[in-house]
Structure formats: structure tokens, C-alpha cells
Image (tube, rainbow, N blue to C red):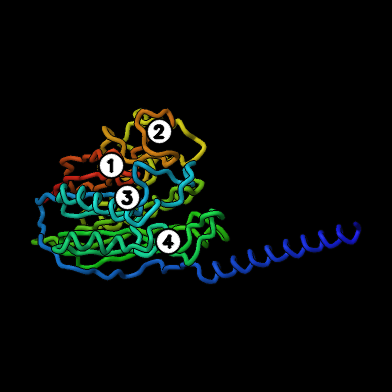
């Protein structure tokens, strides 16, 4: 019996040491291969535009976090309190992307900001979603900025996320002269940072006819699951960039998923009732002068918590308004509208802005 007990504990020790060694090797692998983008990187622009703009013109912009085609109304997500890592099949992904494309085409916006767009990820069956979207906008400029690149995410243990290659994506009818990836503060420290999104801005410059000004468009997707400090730092960096461009005389429009409540939202409309998971930060006006415009439409929620499949009648349904735009003082905001898709294709609804460039 003593020999048996001794052998058992030796075997157990060997197994523990083996698991520890494998974990250490995995961490070394992730650290060595961690995505480390430069502070600023030039982004290639593809396609061709069809519309020039001048002072006094009005344009429409749409922002849509597409949830990589997996976070539709029938699904939840493990990091929001659900159980699902991804959807059941590639067919579900392509069906959702098709629905997203049709929804966007119906709005016929001049500029479309997309977030959470996969191009080669296990969670979306390695479907190139950016390419699928691009095919439906042949007369547009397209630009893609990577913000999530990891060779292997080992959690959840029983059904890991695996390989991720994703980013933010802008499709524009306007004549983009240049595009740039601008890195934001990383809200996570090592070793968690090895498997986390590296947040960024996708900044595009549009020449304005009969003017020395440019229209500076900024596609935004800020941190979600950080402690709050990362999100605040990222928002401050966004504001500094916007103020700098406006000081040059440029028109500036930033839009996307802020993962925060903008000042124009009535916080009482969608109270935070579920506090065990994601809780959005609140953005104040202190970073920008009063004449900057925060553009949201809280008549319809723009996002939901993925703790369960969507059920508007459920007491566990947590709704938010996290998506919208910020416009510089030299613009006139004509309207902002959230399109009510009932979260059929994503855990976000698209938001459309109509804005005029002041002469």
C-alpha cells in the first residue's frame, strides 16, 4: 500500500509539473508572438470613390459593430455571462453578414464604419468578412485596421477561442487621400495583454473641394472589459487627436462603438440593472468644448448584453446606447438615427448620422 501511495503521489507530481511546463511554454509562445503594432501605421486604401465634397455639402455616415457575424439575436457570449463561444456553423456567419450588408445597403450612407470584422478567425470559421462586405460596395474606398491579432487564445479551456485576426473597417464613397492606424493605450498588462485587443483608431483624410480643409474621419472601437482606466485613456487620446485636427481648420467626425455612454444619452432610459458583467463607462464633456456635438439616438438601444439570447420581454435583458458620433463645431448635425434591427444579426444596431459641413 505504501508503495502504491508513493507511486500515486509521484505520478501526480509529474503531471502537475508537466502541466506547469506546458502552461509556461504556452505563455512564452504567446509573449514572443504578441501583436505589437507601431504607434502610427499607414493603411492601404483599395477601390475607387464616386463622390466629392465641398463646404456646405451634407453627407451621411453609418456605424455598425457587426459582432463578427456571430452575436445575433439567438446567441449569448461567455464573457457577458452566457455560455457560447461562437455560433454553430459557418452558414450562420454568412447569413448574418448577408443580413448586415443588406441592412447597410438600405441606408445608402456615404461612409460606413464597421467594428469587430474578422478576416481569418476560428470564431467565425476563418471567413473573410471584410472581403464579403467589400464585394457589395464596388464603387467605394475600403480600409482595414487590425486591432485583434493572436495566434492562439487558450480560453475557455473546453472550447477555446483559438486564432484571431480582426479589426475595424471603413467603406467610403468619398475620395480618401490617406488612411492611418493610430494606436491607443493598452488597457491590459502582461500576461493578459498577450491575448487582448490592441485598440486603435482608423483615421482617414478626405480632401474638401474649393478649400484647404480636410474632412478627417475616425473609426472608433474602445475597450470593453477593462477596469475603466484604459477606456478613459483611449477616449482622452481620441479627443486630443480631434482637437488637433480641428485646430488645423479641418472638419472632424469620429464614430463607432465607444463602449461608453456619451453625454447626449438619457441614462435613465436604459438603467444598468445587471452589474455582474460588462458595465459601460460614462463620458463627460470636459475633454471637448461645448460646441462639439455628441450624436446619439436613445429612442432605440444600440447595444445589448450577451448574457442570453435576445428577448425584449426578459427581465435579464440589459440594453445600452454605446454607439454614435462626435462632430466638430464646424458641422451642422441634421439627424442621428438608430436603426432598429431587433439585434437580428449582431448585438449592436447601426446608427446613421446626417451632417452638413459648414461653409
- Name of the residue lying farthest toward the right: 2
> Where is residue 263 drawn, in percent x and y?
33, 37
Question: Circle 4 — which element?
Answer: helix
Q: Measure the C-alpha gap from mark 3 to mark 4.
A: 19 Å
Sequence-wise, the earlier of marks 2 and 1 is: 1
- Residue wearing tag 1: 294
Give the secondary structure at mark 1.
strand
Q: Which residue is mark 4?
A: 122
Query: In front of the other: label 2 or label 4?
Result: 4
Vertical placement of residue 189 versus 325, above or below: below
Could one spot residue 183 in this view of the protein?
Answer: no
State how far apart marks 2 and 1 are (Cα): 26 Å
Q: Earlier in the sequence, mark 3 or mark 4?
A: 3
Q: Residue at x 29, y 56 (%)?
A: 94
- Which tag, 2 or 4, sits closer to the chain's start? 4
* Residue at screen point 20% across, 58% down: 215
Q: Secondary structure at mark 2?
A: loop
Give the left or right position of residue 260, taking residue 6 as reference: left
Distance CA(mark 1)–CA(mark 4) = 36 Å
Q: Which mark is residue 317?
A: 2
Left or right side of 191 for 306: left
The residue under label 3 is: 65
The disc, 1 or 4, on the residue closer to the chain's N-terminal end is: 4
Q: Nearer the viewer, mark 2 or mark 3?
A: 2
Q: Residue at x 55, y 68 (%)?
A: 31
Amino acid at each position: 500500500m505504501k508503495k502504491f501511495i508513493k507511486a500515486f503521489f509521484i505520478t501526480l507530481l509529474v503531471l502537475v509539473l508537466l502541466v506547469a511546463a506546458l502552461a509556461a511554454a504556452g505563455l512564452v509562445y504567446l509573449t514572443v508572438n504578441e501583436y505589437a503594432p507601431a504607434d502610427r501605421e499607414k493603411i492601404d486604401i483599395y477601390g475607387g470613390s464616386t463622390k466629392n465634397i465641398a463646404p456646405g455639402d451634407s453627407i451621411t455616415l453609418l456605424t455598425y459593430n457587426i459582432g463578427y457575424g456571430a452575436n445575433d439575436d439567438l446567441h449569448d457570449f461567455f464573457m457577458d455571462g452566457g455560455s457560447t463561444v461562437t455560433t454553430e456553423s459557418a452558414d450562420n456567419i454568412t447569413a448574418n453578414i448577408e443580413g448586415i450588408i443588406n441592412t447597410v445597403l438600405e441606408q445608402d450612407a456615404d461612409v460606413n464604419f464597421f467594428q469587430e470584422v474578422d478576416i481569418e478567425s476560428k470564431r467565425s470559421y476563418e471567413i473573410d468578412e471584410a472581403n464579403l462586405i467589400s464585394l457589395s460596395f464596388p464603387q467605394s474606398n475600403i480600409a482595414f485596421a487590425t486591432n485583434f491579432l493572436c495566434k492562439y487564445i487558450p480560453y475557455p479551456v473546453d472550447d477555446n477561442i483559438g486564432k484571431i485576426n480582426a479589426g475595424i473597417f471603413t467603406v467610403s464613397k468619398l475620395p480618401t487621400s490617406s488612411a492611418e492606424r493610430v494606436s491607443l493605450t493598452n488597457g491590459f498588462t502582461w500576461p493578459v495583454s498577450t491575448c487582448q485587443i490592441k485598440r486603435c483608431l482608423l483615421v482617414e483624410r478626405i480632401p474638401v473641394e474649393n478649400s484647404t480643409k480636410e474632412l478627417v474621419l475616425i473609426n472608433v472601437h474602445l475597450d470593453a472589459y477593462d477596469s475603466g482606466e484604459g477606456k478613459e485613456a483611449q477616449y482622452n487620446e481620441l479627443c486630443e487627436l480631434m482637437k488637433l485636427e480641428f485646430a488645423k481648420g479641418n472638419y472632424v467626425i469620429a464614430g463607432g462603438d465607444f463602449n461608453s455612454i456619451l453625454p447626449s444619452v438619457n441614462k435613465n432610459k436604459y438603467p444598468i440593472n445587471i452589474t455582474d458583467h460588462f458595465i459601460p463607462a460614462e463620458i463627460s464633456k470636459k475633454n471637448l468644448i461645448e460646441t462639439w456635438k455628441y450624436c446619439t439616438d436613445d429612442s432605440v438601444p444600440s447595444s445589448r448584453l450577451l448574457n442570453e439570447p435576445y428577448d425584449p420581454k426578459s427581465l435579464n435583458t440589459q440594453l445600452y446606447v454605446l454607439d454614435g458620433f462626435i462632430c466638430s463645431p464646424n458641422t451642422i448635425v441634421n439627424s442621428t438615427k438608430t436603426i432598429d434591427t431587433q439585434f437580428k444579426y449582431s448585438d449592436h444596431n447601426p446608427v446613421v448620422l446626417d451632417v452638413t459641413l459648414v461653409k
